[in-house]
Image (cartoon, rainbow, N blue to C red):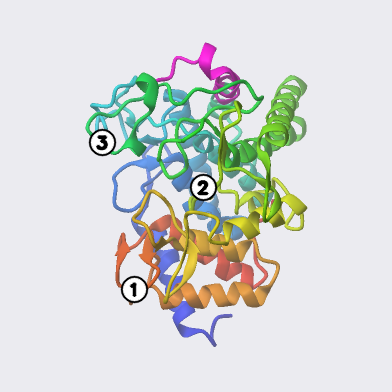
């Protein structure tokens, strides 16, 4: 299908093989452990994103199906270990950021609390069901982990008064720790659920991270469907729907602002007390990805306005240079564009020609590595972070598949 695009075919094949052969590990208990590539730990977010394109063949391939189900089981086991952690060790080895001032455990590599880290396992479990019909992964661990997630999101609606979570890292950049003795910037009640960190693992400026709350709304509605059609649990369905509605109401009330140039747009963060952060970040969930994740439609007027804002110089992390233009991140140096964000720009375009143009841009900025970087300089792609980044590789693959009219169900 890619015979007329030999470089595309080569990069696609390399990326698919690299993720499968170098980042996945089947454990003795039948579960699956997935590293990011250059760090020997598993992020709940990255592992789900890395495995997502394989769902396209999981219905026909029992090995792939078992690997993904094994990852879901491992993810929920780890959530049970500590629902506030974002990254875990393969076993209780005590490796990782052990000097952080928070409740570290031997299983935990890093304990930066991120709403999206809990969204991704729910999303992957739902997509596995929808793409294969399999339901065995809705196990005891799934039920227990899900219960903890719902309880935590409820608690963090009232972060100021009910949460005991604290995080501090000493002698580090400001983005790696939380202010106010580890509690984060002050917030007021909005109905949304609080997040300490972004999907970049950088600290939130304001505690209500709109893209992650959007993602929570979506996956909670997945829970309603799972509870109704698979688990026959009306109480769980009601609990999830009520929480989804509360968070969504908070987004609509506190997460939308009137921009002088673009009209009504979504803010990236707010504190519920009148402060807003207008930007977008390359990592997913992002405001750009909200249509991709299923929070809104591609033609939703506020999303359309927000997308125009994101892909303009008004977004402080949109960089335009001699080699490329796209969204970067405060997680990497200024003027570095992320392939993840370029792929998302393509995946949220309704034009297949635009998708193909973005693919050519990605392929022209790999610096001969044959895989995707984390970020590259807008003027000189030979300057980049990470030789290869598995999450970016698989986002590239997903965009390739989308140009061929192939996409994951759900």
Residue at the spot of label 2? 68
Query: Is residue 373 visible in the rendered structure shown here?
Result: no
Which residue is most to the front?
A: 260
Q: Assess disc 2: are there few (<14), some (14-19) or many (≥20) residues with their C-alpha within 10 Å of its C-alpha.
A: many
The disc, 1 or 3, on the residue closer to the chain's N-terminal end is 3
What quarter of the picture does the N terminus occupy? Answer: bottom right
For the residues labelled 2 and 1, the Cα–Cα distance comes to 37 Å
Is residue 90 covered in magenta? no
Does 151 sit above or below residue 227? above
Which of the two residues, 136 or 100, is positioned nearer the viewer here? 100
The disc, 2 or 1, on the residue closer to the chain's N-terminal end is 2
Q: Is residue 213 left or right of residue 370?
A: right
* Secondary element type, mark 3: loop
Residues marked 3 and 2 touching at CB (< 8 Å): no
Which residue is most to the bottom?
A: 4
Residue at the spot of label 1? 380
Which residue is drawn at the image coordinates 48% and 54% (left, top)? 316
Query: Is residue 161 visible in the rendered structure shown here?
Result: yes
Please name which of the two marks, 3 or 2, marks the residue nearer to the observer: 3
Residue at the spot of label 3? 172
Residue 363: x %, y % from top left: 44, 76
Q: Assess disc 3: are there few (<14), some (14-19) or many (≥20) residues with their C-alpha within 10 Å of its C-alpha.
A: few
What span is colored magenta in the figure?
148-166
Residue 407: x %, y % from top left: 65, 62
For the residues labelled 3 and 2, the Cα–Cα distance comes to 36 Å
Residues marked 2 and 1 touching at CB (< 8 Å): no
Please name which of the two marks, 2 or 1, marks the residue nearer to the observer: 1
Q: Assess disc 1: are there few (<14), some (14-19) or many (≥20) residues with their C-alpha within 10 Å of its C-alpha.
A: some
């Amino acid at each position: 299908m890619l015979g007329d695009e030999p470089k595309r075919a080569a990069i696609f094949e390399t990326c698919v093989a690299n993720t499968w052969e170098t980042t996945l590990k089947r454990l003795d208990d039948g579960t699956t452990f997935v590293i990011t590539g250059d760090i020997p730990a598993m992020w709940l977010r990255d592992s789900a994103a890395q495995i997502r394109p394989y769902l396209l063949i999981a219905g026909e391939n029992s090995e792939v199906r078992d690997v993904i189900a094994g990852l879901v089981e491992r993810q929920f086991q780890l959530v049970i270990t500590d629902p506030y952690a974002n990254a875990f060790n393969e076993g209780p080895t005590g490796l990782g950021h052990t000097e952080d001032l928070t409740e570290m455990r031997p299983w935990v590599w890093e304990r930066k609390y991120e709403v999206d880290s809990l969204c991704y396992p729910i999303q992957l479990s739902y997509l596995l069901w929808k793409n294969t019909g399999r339901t065995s992964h809705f196990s005891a661990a799934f039920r227990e982990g899900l219960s903890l997630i719902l309880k935590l999101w409820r608690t963090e609606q009232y972060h100021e008064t009910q949460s005991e979570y604290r995080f501090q890292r000493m002698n580090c950049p400001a983005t790696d720790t939380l202010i106010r003795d580890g509690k984060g910037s002050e917030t007021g009640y909005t109905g949304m659920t609080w997040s300490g960190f972004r999907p970049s693992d950088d600290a939130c400026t304001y505690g209500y991270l709109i893209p992650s709350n959007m993602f929570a709304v979506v996956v909670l509605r997945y829970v309603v469907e799972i509870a109704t059609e698979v688990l026959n649990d009306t109480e769980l369905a009601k609990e999830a729907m009520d929480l989804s509605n509360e968070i969504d109401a908070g987004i609509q009330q506190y997460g939308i602002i009137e921009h002088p140039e673009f009209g009504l747009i979504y803010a990236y963060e707010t504190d519920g007390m009148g402060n807003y952060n207008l930007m977008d970040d390359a990592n997913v969930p992002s405001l750009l990805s909200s249509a991709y994740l299923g929070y809104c439609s591609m033609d939703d007027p506020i999303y359309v306005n927000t997308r125009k804002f994101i892909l303009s110089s008004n977004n402080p992390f949109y960089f335009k240079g001699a080699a490329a233009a796209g969204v970067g991140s405060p997680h990497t140096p200024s003027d570095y564009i992320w392939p993840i964000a370029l792929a998302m720009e393509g995946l949220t375009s309704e034009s297949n020609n635009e998708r193909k143009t973005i693919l050519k841009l990605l392929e022209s900025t790999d610096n001969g590595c044959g895989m995707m970087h984390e970020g590259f300089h807008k003027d000189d792609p030979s300057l980049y972070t990470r030789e290869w980044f598995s999450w970016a590789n698989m986002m590239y693959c997903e965009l390739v598949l989308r140009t061929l009219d192939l996409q994951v169900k759900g």
